[in-house]
Amino acid sequence: MDDDIKEAVLSFLPGLSDETLTSLLEIFGELGVESRGDLSFIQEKDLERCLRPIQCRRLLNGIKNDGLPPLQIEFVDVASPTPSNPSSSSSENTWPSVALPGRQWYIDFSVRWNEMPAAVQQAVEDGRRPSPGERRDVVKVVVDQMLAHDPNPTRAMCHSVARRITRDYPTSFADVGKAGDVVVDGCQSLLQQLKTRVEYKNRRNTLARRRGERRPRSEVAEGARVMTRGPVDQYGCVRWGPVELPDGETETTLNEIKRQLLNIYSEEGMGGAERAEPLMVKTYVIQRRYLNSVPAPGIAEIKKEWPFLFTPRGLYSHFGLLTDVSILNKLREALNNKGSTVISYCKDLQRHPGIEDVLGSYDPETSDRAACILLLLMAYFKEPENAIMLKTDPCSTAADVQRTLTLPSTPCLIVQGDMMKPTAWMLSAEGEVVMGPHEPFINGLAVVFASYYSFNLQYPDEISRTLEFIQRYFLGINPNTGSKSKKKCINSNKSTLVRKLIDFEWMTM
């Protein structure tokens, strides 16, 4: 969906939570809203599911008046260079744009680049990434300009400003690696810096603090909650709930193919995965319908109905159709290209006992790089290893693991042998081993990650930062809003680490 739609909503309802915003955008998608202009056809009854009456009216009133052109006071030197060059702005061009009554200031906010240090102006003019110090100067100047309009800009206001900067100057502010790969557009990391600076400037200003609105308890009647699928399930997916059947297929023929799959399993077991793969692709529509049903089926039920989803080949294929990401290939490529950056950056960190312990047991010649990087990320985010990995004896069977280990309900890798030099792995979910043993370790990492998406599972709080970092930095799944963790906003620690790794890449070129 067009980002202009999201920005329009935030401009009219700046205090809207990320969770409510995500739900509202989903409603727009269901109604067929494709552009900002389509918002004029929205009615109040369309919004009642996720907005309160006053919020509905404020949004509709804002949409109604959105077509009025903004009044701007601007001095233009005819002989000056193009406006896209920030250093070309004349020293007199420091007047802020003036909006019509009722129009929020940040909608038309423009950074006065002539107030930036000369080094910053030159970097942006040349289209290169400012150094970390120069970037901090940008944040300071931008926040000072914002505070002239509002003593304590909200996160939504900061987001609007950050989005405009990254759109206008993507080569300078997008998080682009030295190989030219765009990790994320840079909006979230810049947003985090802007909001942190705002909070710092207001640390002693109690009068400017904002309090979020509380929804009265009386608005949700006892027992009125209805089980439904939410944003977490669909987050980052491109074919979460497909409707159209494959060409030439009907419900009857697809159910017949499903029976063929069950026959293959009964004859060959998991060894029939290769033969089953094209049939699994063909039945993807009814697989998603089953997995998305309410109440959600348990893992044991899913394995009974669709056993080949519990093979690496079957799960990779399903994840690829769901997200348009070839997970194993993408993960291998990312670890080859970016793994060294993560390890080298961690070596430069001081006084971090968790990272020091991991690097102390890492041997570049014999250790598994994927395992090392996963352990480093968990140490950096201070998340426990046993939230996603458990160690067992190299000779243990699935029955041994279930008897000797306390398995979590969420997907977990059972590592056979040393954590840094695993000989094989198994996957457990809902307290049972459901896949393996297999090798190598990177395949297991791909499997455990794909499980969260394929089976509509939420990231556990204790490992959510590591999983979202893998999702965004390594796999390139970067939705603008939402999260698969309970917090419906992009984790600030993850955004900070992405930015630091990008800066580290550029400084070590």
Image (cartoon, rainbow, N blue to C red):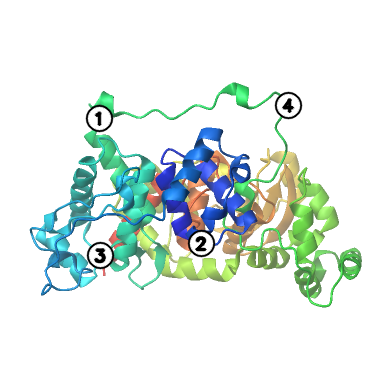
Query: Disc 3 versus disc 2: distance between alpha carbons?
Result: 32 Å
Q: Can you say which quadrant of the picture contains the C terminus?
A: bottom left
Say which of marks 3 and 2 sits in front. Answer: 2
Residue of label 2: 35
The answer to which of marks 1 and 2 sits earlier in the sequence is: 2
**Location of residue 101 with respect to 436 vertically, above or below:** above
Query: Disc 2 versus disc 4: distance between alpha carbons?
Result: 37 Å
Q: Is residue 153 left or right of residue 458?
A: left
> Callout 2 environment at 10 Å: few (<14), some (14 to 19), or many (20+)?
few
Query: Disc 1 versus disc 2: distance between alpha carbons?
Result: 39 Å
- x and y percent of residue 130 in the render? 22, 61
The quarter of the picture where residue 151 lies is: top left
> Callout 4 environment at 10 Å: few (<14), some (14 to 19), or many (20+)?
few
What residue type is disc 1 on?
A: Arg
- x and y percent of residue 101 in the render? 31, 43
Residue 129's disc is 3
Q: Is mark 1 on a helix, strand or loop?
A: loop
Residue 223's disc is 4
> Callout 1 environment at 10 Å: few (<14), some (14 to 19), or many (20+)?
few
Query: Disc 4 versus disc 3: distance between alpha carbons?
Result: 53 Å
Looking at the image, can residue 404 be seen?
yes
The quarter of the picture where residue 156 lies is: top left
The answer to which of marks 3 and 2 sits earlier in the sequence is: 2
